[in-house]
Image (spheres, helix red, strand yellow):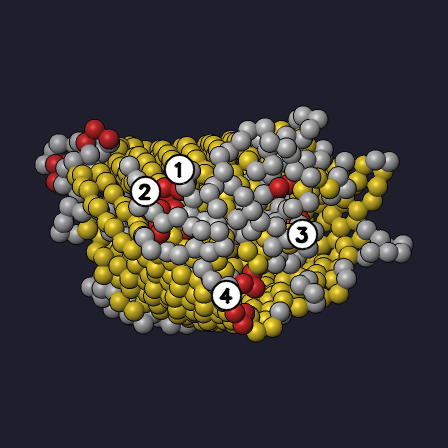
Amino acid sequence: MKSQCPTAPKGGLRLRAPILPCVLIATFASPALGQETLPIIEIGAPKPDVDRAGGEPASVGNNGTEIGPGNNGQICADGICNDPHSYAAPIESLGTKVNAPVMDTPVTTKMVTRRMLEDQQAITLDQALKNVSGVAFSGGGDAALGNSFRQIILRGFPTQNYFRDGFRVDSFGLAFAGASNVEMASVESVEVLKGPAAILYGAVEPGGIVNINTKQPLDKPAFSLQQQIGSYSSYRTTIDATGPLTSNKDLLYRFVMSYENDGSFRAFGYNRNLMINPVVRWNIDASTWVRASSQFQQNNFNQDMFFVPYFGMFTPLWLGRSFNWGPKSPYNEQQNFTELTWHHDFNKDWSIQQTAFMQLLRNDWADNGGFGSIADCITPGSTSCFSFPSPNNVTLNWGAYPSDNRQAEYATTVNLVGHFKTSDYLNHTLLSGVDYYRYNFRGQNLLALNNSSDVLFGAPQLPTPAFGLVPYNATEQYADNLGVYLQDQIKLPYGVTVLGGARYQYINSRTGASDNSKFCGPYSDNAFAGLLIPCNFDTITTRSQLVNQRVTPRVGLLWRPLEWVSFYGNYAESYSPNYNGKLVLGTNDPTPPSAGVQTEGGVKFSLLDGKLQATASYYHLVKTNIPIGIPNDFNHVMVIGEGRSQGPELDIQGELLPGWSVNLAYANTDALTTKSNPTYLGVPAVGSPIPFVPRNVGSLSSAYEFKAGDLKGLRLGARYDYTGYLPFYHYANDGTYIYGQSTPGYGIVGVFGAYEFNVDQLKVTAQLNVSNLFDKTYFITGGLGPQAFDASHPGGYSVPYTNPMQVGWNLPGYNYNVIGAPRMLRGSIKVSF
């Protein structure tokens, strides 16, 4: 059959036929859409010339068709590579999915470099992201599964996923630790793309995406052993080995392993984490390589609910940062990643890359202390004055909601990148691709019919444990996502760049849930009629399917009148899934995706010969179709919510003087609820701030390294992290939002010192970091109460589980107050050769 695609004469390209089908055909057929016919892949061609001193191919970064880390794990473009020993990162790989200079891309991105991670001794992802403007975290007790945070908030909207080497890693609702459990030992750098990223990355939240670039094999042998010791019996050991497996360096490996065993400033707290990450890369010839990697991770820690009970609804029972009102609550999670990538350069202008990815995830958690309440004789309307054995007792009660969840993700993507000209003045960088993403989830929960209790005041009595566990809820979620996208970045005369493209997204979502309001469970109609049916996978009675499809465009314009300054603007749309296992009220349809629209403008600077870079931007972002929960209904939502976020952001990173590094990040995020349902108490009212989004967040860090003299090898630094007041779900009894009742703002100071020296052939680095230097007491999140963020409605608005004024139970009489860590020390000795 004769192809209908246009052929390209040498020296130019004339587009007469639809380009996307032709580009995809070119992937697998010999006729190419380019300046010349794409050659056949030849195995065993000569190896590239290598600069033996630096271990880098002489042509590194020159062809401009790389996607992510290339030779020796560096991100390069236009002959420039990011320096892992610098705070500056002039090349980005996330915003356009083709490695390109930051100054030439009309979108907002930022990279946290390896040097920044090392200076911080960052062992959690939230620590790394404090260096980026527009990023916040909802901390959270039960919802955080005992970790430092539960959700990343980008430009005012939370996200449940992150990306790993450009691939989406999902977390169903809040059932999994998700991004808070990222093991940083295998992370080379962290990138953030702000604003809707649907065109390249599919159905994601409109605030942006976070991507971790993992450590890649190097062609020079290297080995390091690091031992970290910190406050509260914290120990972490990391092994990192890399190098060639063959004499001609065509086969490279990297092996990273870490083990962490931490105590906690909180009673009962602990964290144990084992990670093993082998990577092998085969450089088949000068143009082709294949990489295979896997990662196994086992996490065990204690869930900490962080609730502080209130006596008589007004007096908090505060016993210090370390006191834990909840019982021991173990959490276990096992995670397995597998990835296979191949890349081929047809010539200096055209390349193709494909990745296949799989994640298998399982957890089980006790969720002891899932809620806390006080029964007393003081609260207005209380009936517990007749409690046994003493009518004057004040009793703390908590429940148990254990869970067992399994998740699997399968994905693949093919990208074709090419450079061509359509005239003497139009230079194109074309990206076309197809991706497929499959998501499976199954989870079930138990509920304690009899809650536990402890006497706080009054006649002593033995505590009663929670017992009578019955299957209470079972949920299934399956989704197939298929995307086809095309993007063209066109360089015009006079420093003008135009970026345009669109994505077609297809989502087939299936949901199944047990009906614990009527059919099964201890509070169903059947149970009240005398028939208790367990809610498990065998009793899932409500199933539905919903097919969605949408085209999401993105356009951008950049003008670079001088080498050191660029002005840019963009318009982008998003399409974010709501994989929550819930049905839309009054229908049998799963929760449909939400939509987002953003407009943005800004200016970028590259100063001091590219060693210092800055980005200032202002955006306006609207998210629609937000699900709203329904009181006492675990199976349904209403899709009527809308939120708006806008504000300025500023990022500066790089080197001011030789040896003097600096990073600054600041955002003023104005995030408000613009549509809601005032019927239900606890749902954000129109005009109220979006919960857990601080208005002002800023970070300033600086480090100085002595390059000569007696102090050579010494590096000193400090940082200041500020978070403004934090709005939360705080409402009066009539449902109106109470302004000013937010978690207070706070500022935290940290310092570090590192000294590098040689012992024979070994390089030794000793380092000490001190966080919260002045031991400030602060709260990451507060005031959730029973109007808490419903863990079953991620990304949506939630409501109280029950009526907040039940007689006899002081349910409003507690708050989740996620307490910030006190002064913490972390020392490190790293030996490498």
Q: Out of 195 and 469, give the one closest to the viewer.
A: 195
In this view, the mark in front (1 or 2): 2
Looking at the picture, how far across and down is residue 808, in whole percent? 26, 53
Q: Is residue 622 left or right of residue 289?
A: left
In this view, the mark in front (1 or 3): 1
Callout 2: helix, strand or loop? loop
Residue 465 sits in which quadrant?
top left
Q: Out of 644 and 352, give the one closest to the viewer.
A: 352
Which residue ends up furthest to the bottom in the rendered image? 561
Task: Give the residue drawn at x 25%, y 65%.
Answer: 676
| Residue under pointer 2 | 3
Residue 3 sits in which quadrant?
top left
Q: Earlier in the sequence, mark 1 or mark 4?
A: 1
Q: Earlier in the sequence, mark 1 or mark 2?
A: 2
User: Which quadrant of the figure contains the C terminus?
Assistant: top right
Which residue ends up furthest to the front in the rendered image? 9
Label 4 – label 3 distance at C-alpha: 32 Å
Q: Amino acid at mark 1?
A: Ala
User: Which quadrant of the figure contains the N terminus?
Assistant: top left
User: Do the residues bearing badges 3 and 2 touch, measured as CB atoms within 8 Å?
Assistant: no
User: Do the residues bearing badges 1 and 2 touch, measured as CB atoms within 8 Å?
Assistant: yes
Label 1 – label 4 distance at C-alpha: 29 Å
Q: Is residue 788 left or right of residue 494?
A: left
| Residue under pointer 1 | 29
Q: Earlier in the sequence, mark 3 or mark 2?
A: 2
